[in-house]
Amino acid sequence: MGDKVRKKSAQLKKLGFIASVVLLTPQVMIAQTEAEEAIECFVEATRTWKVTCDPSPAVSVGEVMLHPDNYPSELVGEIVRGLKELAVSSPISQVRIAAVGWLALKGEVFEAHSGSTVKELEEIYFSTPFGDVRRGIASKIRLQLAKNDAVSFLERAAEAPATSDEAGIDLPSPRIALHSLASMGELGRATLRRLSIMGTVTDPVAKRYLKNLADVNFRLPKE
Amino acid sequence: MGSADTVSLVGDLEVAPRGWSWDSSSFAYDSTAGLDCGDFGPVYLPGDSLYLAENTRTTNCDTGLYDPSIVSYPDSGYSEAQILDGGPNDSLWYVTEATYFMDRGAVLNPFITPGGYRDTLTHNKDKNDCLGALGTIVVNLFEFNWFCRGDSLNFASFLEGVYKHEGYGSGALNGHQGRNEAAAMNPGWDPHTRAETMVHETAVSLRAVLSTQVWLLDVAASEYGADHNFVNNNWCGKLWILDPGSRYSYSSLKLPNGQCF
């Protein structure tokens, strides 16, 4: 794995140099290379549940997401871009979900990053073809500090159809979005009331769930 | 060296594993303790998605398996402490105890229970059968199958199949709870193992990373436990189900993937 990472990194440096003639600054080039190495290591570690990169990259995905203000914005941007790409295109479910989990972290800890993190998660939600990623986002978005942004996103998520790979899934992503709204207090309940009146939820499982929630005034069991 | 250099040592710091894992009290399952989380509706024909039962948490309706639920209680499930001994690790935070568990139950769709919603029959044969058996034409799904059509053995085996599907299956790891517990026991998906080695500079970062990691494990285990490509074949057969405005029809019940449930 270490050889593979270094080889890829060398290729990227070469490509980065060519591109830099046109538009990339040296800082961006370095950030791209470091981010690429970190993402490669992240994929391998997530896939195998072990840290297998040797030597481990100086920058880890988790470290950057946990301390985004300690790193150059170019590097943070490149890591975010890499995680978003994994969430919409990795063939491995646990890699996709882990990408979402780590990306969400900075919005759960830092107020300054919370609004932009919701936006990034929303972009993934509406561009990934994978239902597991959407179910994960619809569930975890509740932990974002930017509650208003999260509720607005969940409203849009509840209205959107489930992905095609969710056919027959017991709890498809629009249904989970509704549940998250119901878990977010009066702010979420107000949105659920609006969705119920407007009738804009189309997924059949979610539609039935919204009707059942309306019957109990949008309050969850044991709340 | 001709002059003094400053050297930074960089490495991953972690607590040596302490053998943490689930224990005999970690898993609880009660086939009557699941929560009605709002997913159930009437069981009529034609039905694109008829929910018969669910395997849920017993304390709330969050997705996921592990308790306390990570999305509702991200600060729970562990205790932390700060090292204050003046030594090389002074001020770092670590996990002193991990107390994750799994408390789940099954819940039947009320519509299929003996107390389920009663419809007024309109079809002559349906009416005659129920008048003869029960003296009424206002019956529910249970009563129609059990009494009007005298299919009690079939209905009992159907209910047994439903409970097996939500619970421990019929012997081949083909019940939701059986797979839930098997997933949790996978060493790679055990939150205790993940928690025991963790060290961070602050309690906030410890919480953030641990809750993210446990969430990832929980999602992986949940997808494993919910997979109907494996949770199936606990019952194969037919029930009498009402097409409102028409009549009861003897209908096969299958999972959306076409397999018996």
Image: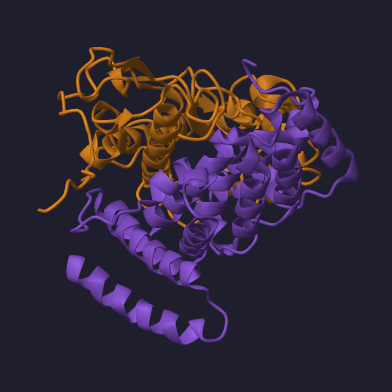
Chain colours: A purple, B orange
Q: Is residue B40 visible?
A: no
Q: Is residue B84 visible?
A: yes
Q: Quadrant of the N terminus of chain A?
A: bottom left
Question: In which quarter of the view is residue B147 placed?
Answer: top right
Residue A22 image position (x, y, % from top left)? 56, 86
Taking depth in this image into account, of B258 and A207 the one nearest to the observer is: A207
Query: Residue B73 versus residue B67: which sits nearer the camera?
Result: B73
Task: Return the residue nearer the eye: B225 or A41.
Answer: A41
Residue extending farthest right: A197
* Image location of residue B13, percent across then percent down: 23, 35
Report whether B239 appears left or right of B81.
Answer: right
Q: Quadrant of residue B180?
A: top left
Q: Compare residues A96 and A41 and report the one nearer the observer.
A: A41
Image position of A42 with respect to B203: above or below: below
B158 left or right, relative to B13: right
| Whole-percent x, y for residue A17 in the image | 42, 83
| The residue positioned farthest toward the left in the image shown | B1
Q: Is residue B91 above or below residue A88?
A: above
Residue B132, image quadrant: top right
Q: Quadrant of the C terminus of chain A?
A: top right
Tally of numbered discs = 0
Q: Is residue B88 left or right of residue A158?
A: left
Q: Residue furthest front?
A: B2
Which percent across, then down, holds residue B62?
55, 30
Q: Farthest residue toward the top? A: B85
Q: Residue at x 50, y 65 (%)?
A: A85
